[in-house]
Image (cartoon, helix red, strand yellow):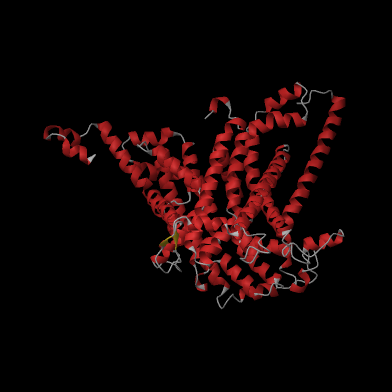
Amino acid sequence: MTLELTQVPAGERRSHLHPRPRNRRRTENVRAAYVFLGPWLIGFLLLTAGPMVASLYLAFTDYNLFTAPQWVGLDNFTRLLDDPNYLQAWKVTGVYVLVGTPLKLAAALAVALLLNATVRGAGFYRSAFYLPSLVGASVSIAIVWKALFMDEGPVDVLQQFLGRPAGGWVGDPDMSMRMLILLTMWQFGGPMVIFLAGLKQVPKELYEAAAVDGAGPVRKFLAITVPMLSPVIFFNLLLETINAFQIFASAFIISGGTGGPAGSTLFYTLYLYLRGFRDFQMGYAAAMAWILTLVIALITVLFFRTSRFWVHYAGDEGR
Amino acid sequence: MTTAATTTRTLVHRQRRARTVGFHAVVLVVLAVILYPVAWMVLSTFKPSAEIGGDASLLPTAVTFDNYTKVLGGVGGVSFWTFFQNSVLLAVLSVIGTVASSALAAYAFARIQFPGRGVYFAVMIGTLLLPFHVVIIPQYIMFNNAGLVDTYIPLLIGKYLAADAFFVFLMVQFMRGLPPELDEAARVDGAGHYRTFWSIMLPLLKPAIVTSAIFSFIWTWNDFLGPLLYLKNPELYTLPIALRLFVDQTSSADYGAQMAMAVLALVPVVLFFLIFQRYLVEGVATQGLKG
């Protein structure tokens, strides 16, 4: 803009200084836009874009926070591939995302269908089921969860009563992951509320027409509910998958900050934290962070690319 | 819906009644399973520690307040109320920053025509999906070099710069639902964007502001990773990391006291939930649908 101004002849410059009303409105808009957007823009540059570039650089260095970063090329990445703990972290996170997320969403959809079928009390139940989503990721609930599944805890007592082998889940590498999957399932209320809102939008006439055609409940569910709900399923699946990658506090508290027993709860974020802030291997941790970002970006792209094959948007609102 | 004759009407009525009862029975069983951990947590804090293990029952045989007196005695030489005050201070300051900066950004996205808006909006949505962990390493280095570790600034600065895109998005969606005639009329009458935002938009935005404020409060209150990274001095600890310190310091058998502190740390969240549950649940519902 300024470059343009200096190049125009003096006679024409006046018209730029006294723009027509429409132009003035436009300039005023742009100025106001940047004032309103200012804090967000500064935040984006200072807290997101800048750090992301910095962490890309750090990923190729050896940096312990106290001496200057040393360029090491691809060293961090080749070391990651040989790091058994890193591979364990992927395994743990992968199982949690692939098993925990579908189970949580299935529970959310099942209860949403149940609540949608009713007239009375749905509002109360909806709120009550939502409560765990609000507190589930907190340190408080992680402590309770640990106590629930401890040796001689309520779950153990129940198992003893049923004559099953006991000893608690907390110290058992085969059971600790199930504890955390149950914890995420317990928080089904968030996606359930979104499913319920989606179910309300499905036109009743569709079900009536299907009933006239003699369709049973299973047929109605598969031919009407699932396609009509697919945008909401898409939204929930994407957000819950991304969230699942970021589990931290629960695993930290339940394993006492170690990822144990036997690495069974060594989640990606927990291992990243330990490498960065226990061992001060900032370069190594930055490489881990970038790989996680790329994987999540890839999954997001994959979700959107495949969405046109299974997500049905209502005709007039198609995107 | 029923077009049946009066003789069959009572039968249909009875069937529907049976279905309703069956439905409530199923939902109540699910509810009992879901709420058991919370009920067990609260009631266990009134049991002597020795009684918590080996027993799945809810009610204590003899009520004791020992667990609570132990917690209120403080952790690591710091009073419980210090942690509580720290948490309140941080949460309140976060709410103010989040609401103000998000409302400003949302107005630009929803109501101002300017070149590049689409790109900025896409970037904002992109940060919504970005894992927080990508930036923690460089952010920590930055704040460490600036000498800001062990202050609340690293935990607060993002709130004042609309860094949590969830709230910006929530408010954009809400503003898009408001009739554009209202602020267009104000603009025609000569009000600038600042006037329009302050006098027209902000009052209308109240429901979205309440929802954002509650979520912001609860998320800040529960936040663990941020305080874990940036707060080293126990005098500055918030409840979640004080709780972690308490767990590390007490013997693992003392679940009674640990859970008593866990309960106290959740009291404000549950209170907010009880008072504002409509706003919270509606906020989640609209967020998902319009997304």
Q: Is residue B133 visible?
A: no
| Residue A64, x across and y down, in percent | 46, 66
**Relative side of A97 to B221, left or right:** right
Q: Nearer the viewer, residue B169 or A172?
A: A172
Q: Residue lying furthest top in this view?
A: A213
**Rendered position, B6 above or below B114:** above
Q: Nearer the viewer, residue B185 or A158?
A: A158
**Relative side of A6 to A275, left or right:** left
| Residue B109, x across and y down, in percent | 42, 40
**Relative side of A7 to A253, left or right:** left
Q: Nearer the viewer, residue A54 or A156?
A: A54
| Residue B160, x across and y down, in percent | 42, 55
**Rendered position, A140 above or below B179:** below
**Relative side of A52 to B4, left or right:** left
Q: Residue lying furthest left in this view?
A: A11
Residue at image position (49%, 40%) is: B173
Q: Is residue B250 visible?
A: yes
Q: Nearer the viewer, residue A73 or B162?
A: A73
Could you tell me how many numbered marks the image carries? 0
Residue at image position (30%, 42%) is: A31
| Residue A236, x across and y down, in percent | 61, 42
Pick the quarter of the image with the N terminus of chain A: top left
Q: Quadrant of residue B290?
A: top right
